[in-house]
Image (cartoon, rainbow, N blue to C red):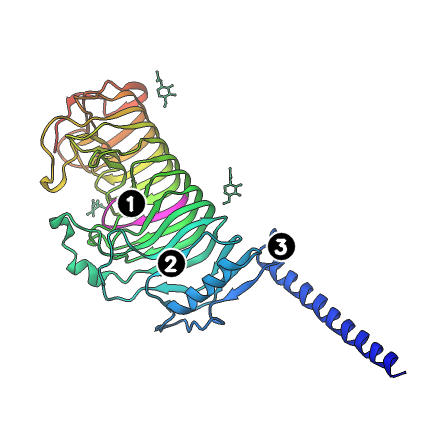
Amino acid sequence: MVGLRRAKTLLFIVLVVMATTIANGAKMLTENDKDEPSKGSGETIDVKASGAKGDGKTDDSKAFADAWKKACESKSPSKIKVRKGKYLVKTLEFKGPCKSAVTFEMDGHIMAPSKATPGKPHCGWINFEKLENFNLNGHGAIFDGQGAHAWKINDCAKTGKCNTLPINIRITGLTNSKIKGIKSTNSKLFHMNIINCKNLTLEDIGIDAPPESLNTDGIHIGRSDGVRLVRAKIKTGDDCISIGDGTENFLVENVECGPGHGIAIGSLGKYPNEQPVRGVTIRRSLIKNTDNGVRIKTWPGSPPGIVSNILFQDITMDNVSLPILIDQVYCPHGHCKKGGPSKVKLSDITYRDIKGTSASKVAVKLLCSPGVPCTNVTLSNIDFVYTGKKGPAVSACSDVKPKLKGKMEPPACTEKAKPDS
Ligand SMILES: *[C@@H]1O[C@H](CO)[C@@H](O)[C@H](O)[C@H]1NC(C)=O
Ligand SMILES: *[C@@H]1O[C@H](CO)[C@@H](O)[C@H](O)[C@H]1NC(C)=O
Ligand SMILES: *[C@@H]1O[C@H](CO)[C@@H](O)[C@H](O)[C@H]1NC(C)=O
C-alpha cells in the first residue's frame, strides 16, 4: 500500500514537472517568435541580469564580458539582450570562435570613457573577432567613443603615427554575418575597421564626427571578400570610406557622405606585398560638401600593385572639390618616398552617370602613373557644373586615354593633369 501511494506521489510530481517544462517551453517559443520568427529556441542573456547598470556612470565592462562568455559557449544559438540605457564600458572583446550563432539585440547605447588611454597599434574599443553567423541588431544603438579629448592631444597628422588611439568598432575575421542599425559617434581614431571578413553585410550604419576631428576615417576596409555596405550616413573629418589592399567584391550602395574627404580606394603602394583591390562597386550614393568625391590614390615610388574592376555608378556630388580623382602621386604632408613613379596598375575602371556641382574648377582629374599607365578607363554620362568664378569646369588627364560614352561635361581630358592642382 505504502509502495503504491509513493508511486502515485512520484507520478504526480513527474506530471507537474513535465507540465511546467512544457509551459515554459511554450513561453520561450512565443518570446522568441516575437523577436525573430525564423530562429528556433535558444538562450537569451540580458546584460542587466549579468550585472550591468546602464546608468552611464558605472563601469559595465564585466557584465558584457560575462554575458558574451555565456553566449559564446552556448551550444545552441543564443541572444544577448541590451535593454534601454547608457552602458559605460572600457575595451570589450567579443571574440570567437563560438559554439553556435550569437545575436546581439541592442536597445541601449554604449559609451567609452572620455579619457584617452593610448593602446597597442590598431587596437579597438569595441572588438568583434573571429565570428561566424554573428548578428547584431542595433535598432539605432549609439557607440559613443567620447573622442573630444583625444582629438586635442592627437597630433598624428604631423608625426605620421596615429595608431595608438582606439578605433571605435573593430570587426575582424567575421564570416556570414550581419551588423545592422548602429551609429558610431565621436571616435577617438577611425570609426570602423573591417579586416579579414567574408560575406559580411553592414546595413543602416551611421557615422558621425565633427569635421574638425582628425584622422577619424569613417569606415576602413581591407583584406576582405564579399562585404556589402548598404544604407549609411557618414559625416567625418577624414575619408568617409577608405578601401585598403586585399579588398575584393565590395559593394557600397545608398550611402550619404559628407562632410569629409569622400570615398577613397587607397592609399595604396605605401607598403610591400599589398594584395590587389578588385571588384569594388560604389553606386546610388550622394557625396556632399567634401574635399574629393570618388578617388583612387597610390604612392609614388611604390612596389607593384593592382587595382581593377572598379565601378562608380549613379553618384550625385553636391559642392565637392575634385569630384572624380585618380591620384597616382599621392603624397600627403610631404611624407613621400623619392624615386620612380607608382607601380600600382589601374585597369577596368568605369565612371558612369556621375553628376552634380564641383567646388573646384578641375572637376575630373585622372593623374595616372607614367610607369604603369591606366588602361580600360571609361567615362560615361558625366555632368558637372563648377560653382566658382573661374570659368567653366575642366577635365585633366595624364597617362590615360579614357573611353568616352554619352554626355561629357566638362569635355574629357582637355588639359594635362599635374600633381597638386
Ligand atoms: C552570407 O551570410 C548570410 C548571413 O548574414 C547568410 O544568410 C548567407 O547564406 C551567406 N551567403 C553565403 C554565400 O554563404
Ligand atoms: C561647400 O563645402 C565646403 C566644405 O568642403 C563648406 O565649407 C561650404 O560651406 C560648402 N558650401 C555650401 C554652400 O554648402
Ligand atoms: C574593360 O572594363 C570593363 C569593366 O570592368 C570590362 O567589362 C571589359 O571587359 C574591359 N575590357 C577589356 C578590353 O579589358
Q: Is mark 2 within 8 Å of ligand 1?
A: no
Disc 2 marks a residue whose amino acid type is Glu
Look at the image and give the residue range highlighted in magenta: 230-241
Disc 1 packing (10 Å; few <14; some 14–19; many ≥20): many
Q: Is mark 3 within 8 Å of ligand 1?
A: no
Residue 50, placed above or below residue 101: below
Residue indicated by mark 2: 93
SS category of the residue bearing label 3: loop
- Residue at 84 percent of width and 77 percent of height: 8
Quadrant, the C terminus: top left
Disc 3 marks a residue whose amino acid type is Gly
User: In the image, which disc is placed on residue 40?
Assistant: 3
**Quadrant of the rendered structure where residue 351 is?**
top left
Residue indicated by mark 1: 240
Residue 86 seen by the camera: no
Foreground pick, 153 / 211: 153
Q: Rounded to the nearest whole Å, what is the CA distance between mark 3 and mark 2?
A: 27 Å
Mark 1 vs 2, N-terminal side: 2
Foreground: disc 3 or disc 1: 3
Residue 237 in magenta? yes
